[in-house]
Amino acid sequence: MTATEPGNLLSVCGFSGGFKTPSGFKYVLDDVSFGLRESAMTAIVGETGSGKSLLALSMMGLAASTFVKTGGSIEYAGADISTYDDRAYRRIRGHDFAMAFQDARAALNPVISVGRQLIDACRAHRRVSVAQAQEIAEGMLRKVHVPEPAQRMRQFPHEFSGGMAQRVMLALALICQPKLLILDEPTTGLDVTIQADIMELIVDLVSSNGMTACLITHDLGVVAETCDDVVVMYRGKVRETGPCAQILQQPEDLYTQQLLRSSRFEELSA
Amino acid sequence: MSSPKSHSPALNVVGLRKEFRVKRGGRARTLVAVDSVSIDVHPGETVALVGESGSGKSTVARCIVRLVDPTAGAVAVHGRDMVGMTHRQLSQAYGDVQMVFQDPNSSLNPRMTARQILTEPLRLHTDMNKSARNARAAELLSMVGLGKEHLDRYPAELSGGQRQRIGIARAIAVSPKVLLLDEPTASLDVSVRGQVLEILHQLQQQQQMAYLFISHDLDVVRRISDRVMVMYLGAIVESGTTEEIFSNPTHPYTKALLSAVPQIDPEERRERFRLEGEIPSPFDVGAGCRLDNRCPLVQPSCRAERPVLAPVSPTHEVACPVVLNGERIAQAV
Amino acid sequence: MTTSLDQAVETIIPKSSRLSGGTVSVRGAIRSLRSSSGTLPIGLSLLAFLVLMSLVSLIWTPYPAAATGTGAFSSAPGAAHWFGTDAVGSDIFSRTISAGRTDVFYTVVAVAISLVIGSSWGAIAGFFGGWFEAVTLRLLEVVQAFPALLMALLIISVLGPGTLNVIMVVAIIPLPDFVRLARAEVLTKKTWQFAEAARLVGNRPLVVLFKHLMPNSWRPLLAYASISAAWVCGNIAALGFIGVGIQPNAVEWGSMIARGESDVVAGAWWEALFPGLGVLVLAIGCQLVGDGIAARNRGEQR
């Protein structure tokens, strides 16, 4: 799967990098190449240490300052954004790219009301008045199925349950109508029934807006039910990429095969 | 409830209830975390306790070993009542019932080596001398698939899967009759999960331990348990054999839960049975069925009276009169 | 095959996370100490210097520390008397380094008493809760409402001066903070699963508290002990200065400062300066050590 194919909104090409540690340089990402197909949902799957979260942060330009890129590029709109400094990234972030994180209640600002955060995000990228932004914010909350949006706008993140907070986070990410939505384990830690609701919401929002989405997860069931393409990572390297249906039913790579066997409990004797 | 077995149950819980007194909005209110829960687990059997947040399943486990004192109810391990024991008697009783904790990162003392962690229960429950204890510690490590080189390592020097295995080794060190497992694989990667489950299975075969497996992960539960009990907001809403629960989920909540689990293979997927809204606050549980504000099948009678467990089959019970009436009508037809 | 996959999914994030194995053992702690930079080595060097100085004074001083009339009264620092002499002719250099023994030793003793009693009290209060904790908290509030030195003076005026009384009083001042700190630590760690596991293994509750929980809290307690040592030595000197210290005219920095205080106006700056420097160096050394430990705790507990 070459990275510079047309039809990709964003392409990662041979991206490598790592951290300096007391015992030398540790590579966390090694020659990672894949593409995010436009208007499709791509899953990046891996276990602990695969580097998937760092990859997502790198795409957003949010990787820690101690992260050192050693090679490769991230191509978007004809430019290599991995070379962008923070100021350049700020123009893309929010407007073109948006990200939803794992623990929504922790990721939202705890001392600012939810409504205020939505309004601020809206007005940062669009020329609207406060009143207009308020209406847009309420509309977003309704779109993510938060009941009684007008009231909820005045509340603070800790007053929301885990599932509700995740919906707020999605509203926040989508309020500026980004082209790319990156979701880093958005449903991990939530109850099973809530997970299913949130994933349905995500799929619905993504497809109705024609957005490109990148879902970082370790749950292959979620990938199978919601994603179009999948990138399998192990220890900083890409093991296999391709359409979901193909990879999950007929994997070619040994690690992918082992992962699927474990997920299906095929290694248990009883 | 269940069909009589030849051995008496290793773990026998009857009518367990746990209330917490909490200050909410200036007033003291009572939170019922566990309401009238009864469980039997026989030697060599695995019973799974399934539920989402607020279900009370972890509280049940802690009440059984009295890390938390139950408000009411009886708990008997290997025939001995646990609820009335003094602290000294409890310390001894912990030779019969043990627990494997969820988080391998915080369930091991960071300042103790694997050797110290494993020999401590031996020191407290047996009169083995030092060399015997060390030998047993090495034996325990090999039983969970680790080697002698791990004996003198600290938890920080081990991976998550290895830590969890030490936790299991510690729990089985004194060969308990009953093992409570509180989400033992929740924090582990999928590839490590299988190994840990396999170890648990083999140990159970060898020692005929009774397992109470607490989990929210239905895939795991389906593979390793003999019976399943589904909990919601502190009460058991359905209980039956694994086969029955997964092929014929009867209670609306069980149906909703099973249909929400994402599956890799399309043939395993179920049609989504939806409940409205989210799990309510445990303070707001009314007099009727706990699910009354979310259930698509709700009737006026549901809000009036709390449903009790009633049999669908000799081994399958459900606490939902609406569904049961429907079943009887279907069977009568 | 299976074990390699297990090793394979080991995290590759550098091991600077909370449960850092490197500093668990004493050997590991010393090793990481040597490689660290910043306030900790400086503080330790200062303290080491003072201890060395005090040890030297045990075997040699230019003049006997308590002797009077060893030279001209109130003479400035010079070849014969490196720090000069005071109003009764005692050699200030000898007295300064000898006083180090007193001040350093009593500081350590007072802090140790405070640490042990305070931490145990706080740990038990936090672990068992109930009426004991409630009473403890109320007591703390009462004691901490008084300004520290004032309270020390009040107690000393009742008990009278003397070594034992001074140490006791000076130990009481930081005690409430240790109680609070230990209680906070226990409250946090009580809910960690290893505490539950320790009970479940069969240990009695008190054993769980002191053998499992408390040893994991030594870092914040040690950091605070170092910082409070700075205050304690200041308080010992202050009491000595006021005159209710160990004994009047004791070979102790506070008393020496008192003795030299009145002569400063006459221009004899050396009499109070050097003992003052002693207190300063001890206080700074303790403070730096405490800061260093606290900073490393912060780095570790990310």
Image (cartoon, coloured by chain):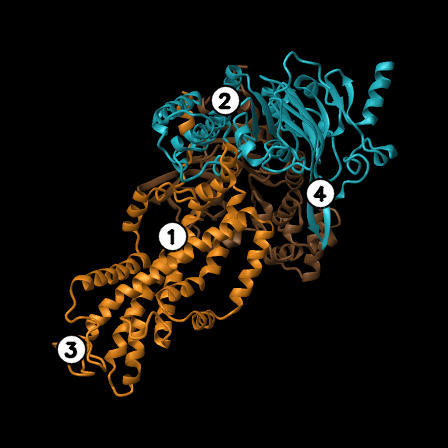
Mark 2 lies on residue: B175
**Where is residue C124 shown, x and y percent of the image?**
51, 49
Chain A color in figure: brown
Give the number of the mark in front: 3 or 1: 3
- Report helix, strand or loop for mark 2: loop
Q: Residue furthest front?
A: C159
Mark 2 closeness class: few <14, some 14–19, many ≥20 residues within 10 Å:
some
Residue B322 figure quarter: top right
- Amino acid type at mark 1: Arg
- Amino acid type at mark 2: Ser
Q: Earlier in the sequence, mark 2 or mark 4?
A: 4
Chain C color in figure: orange
Q: Which mark is residue A94?
A: none
Give the number of the mark in front: 1 or 2: 2
Question: Observer-nearest residue: C141 or C35?
Answer: C141
Q: Earlier in the sequence, mark 3 or mark 1?
A: 3
- Report helix, strand or loop for mark 3: loop
**Where is residue B198 shown, x and y percent of the image?**
50, 20
Mark 4 lies on residue: B31
**Where is residue C195 shown, x and y percent of the image?**
50, 40
- Report helix, strand or loop for mark 4: strand
